[in-house]
Image (tube, helix red, strand yellow):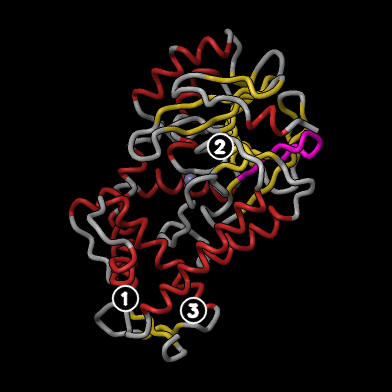
Amino acid sequence: MIDPAAITGVAAPAPGASAALAPGREWLRLPVPGSLRHINVWLLDDGDGLTLVDTGMNVPEARAAWEGPLDGVLAGRPLRRIVCTHHHPDHAGLAGWLATRHGARVWMSAAEYDLVERAYREVGDAAALAARRAAFARDGLEVDERSVRVLSGAGYLGVMSGCPADVGILAAGDTLEAGGRTWRVLELAGHTDGQLLLHDPAAGLLIIGDQVLPHISANVGIYPERRDDDPLASYLASFDALEALAPEPVVLPSHGEPFQGLRARIRVLRAHHGARLEAVERLCREPVTAAEAAMQLYRGALDPLNRVLAFGETLAHLRLLETRGRVQVREHPGGPRRFVATTPGG
Ligand SMILES: [Zn+2]
């Protein structure tokens, strides 16, 4: 069992640099544009090669880090495996580029690979774009010209580096030998359809991706490309699986610093979503569209991406309230549907 303080006491590397966590396990940081600023990725030493967990986004500053300082960390050894926890561009954006450079194989869950593969297949597809527009219009979200880039997938593919051709599929219950350790694979939905987590039970270490983050709440939203139609229910169910891990592991998150106290953090996140569900239910005292509810919850000017994220997150809360019988849907032919609370004053 690893000493938690030996992990949580490690100073965070600057973006483009690395820090040793434990023998065979290295913490790398890559720059990400926007408010996130960085992503943590994990390098596991397999002797004659390396396993990388997550890649960074396909932006010039992240590629420069891989070509410059991080190339020294690899010490001339190739990446043999690249595990992407999920399809988001800060996690999988450089998978194609790094796989080509190193001759590495990319590993993902089937659900996440499906999201990447479909994004490439459907970009520029007028029918797919029309279906997404219709899905948003159904909930009252107007799609202006700036949002089309988000909706069409062009924005996403702009920070990806190709669809990896040689992809291995990992699923819950699989094991992965990497960095001299045996990692058990978990696959959890909610933030996305099938995020991979790697658990080393013998060391008490958990690579958690974005499933639980120490300082921010991961986005949980309904989007046309996702197959899960009640992601908040899936997300809350994933907490049960994480709370069952014993002993409580030290967590390696994709954003922020490694931390101990997973169950305490989950309590905070459960309370956050509980309060958000109550707030959304209150907004439904009068019939409201998802877009109107999102504007009430997230005030201020949002850029097109964050506008879609706020909308998707609000819709996910409405959907769970609907599942629980707290709100009903009223369809309006020719107009957006509205949600209304089933308990007066609820
Ligand atoms: Zn993510």
Is residue 197 rendered to the left or right of residue 225?
right
Quick one: label 1 or label 2, which is nearer the N terminus?
2
Q: Are marks 1 and 2 in contact (CB under 8 Å)?
A: no
Q: Residue at (54%, 30%) from the top-left corner?
A: 41
Indicate the secondary structure of the residue bearing disc 3: helix
- Which residue is identified by label 3? 322
Mark 1 and mark 2: Cα distance apart in space = 35 Å
The yes-or-no answer for disc 3 within 8 Å of ligand 1 is: no
| Residue annotated with mark 2 | 84
Residue picked out by circle 1? 289
Q: Is residue 127 above or below residue 109?
A: below
Helix, strand, or loop for circle 2?
loop
User: Which residue range is magenta in the image?
Assistant: 196-205
x%, y% of residue 111?
Answer: 56, 51
C-alpha separation, residue under disc 1 versus residue under disc 3 = 13 Å
Which kind of residue does numbered mark 2 sit on? Answer: Cys
Residue type at the position of mark 3 = Glu
Q: Residue furthest left?
A: 145
Mark in front: 1 vs 2: 1
Q: CA distance from mark 2 to mark 3?
A: 33 Å
Q: Residues within 10 Å of mark 3 (few under 14, many from 20)?
A: some
* Mark earlier in primary sequence (1, 3): 1
The residue positioned 51% from the left and 64% from the top of the image is 273
Question: Which dot, 2 or 3, sits closer to the camera?
Answer: 3
The residue that appears at 64% across and 41% down in the rendered structure is 169
Quarter of the figure with the N terminus:
top right
- Say what amino acid the circle numbered 1 marks: Thr
Image quadrant assignment for residue 290? bottom left
Q: Residue at x 36, y 23 (%)?
A: 61
Residue 208 image position (x, y, % from top left)? 61, 42
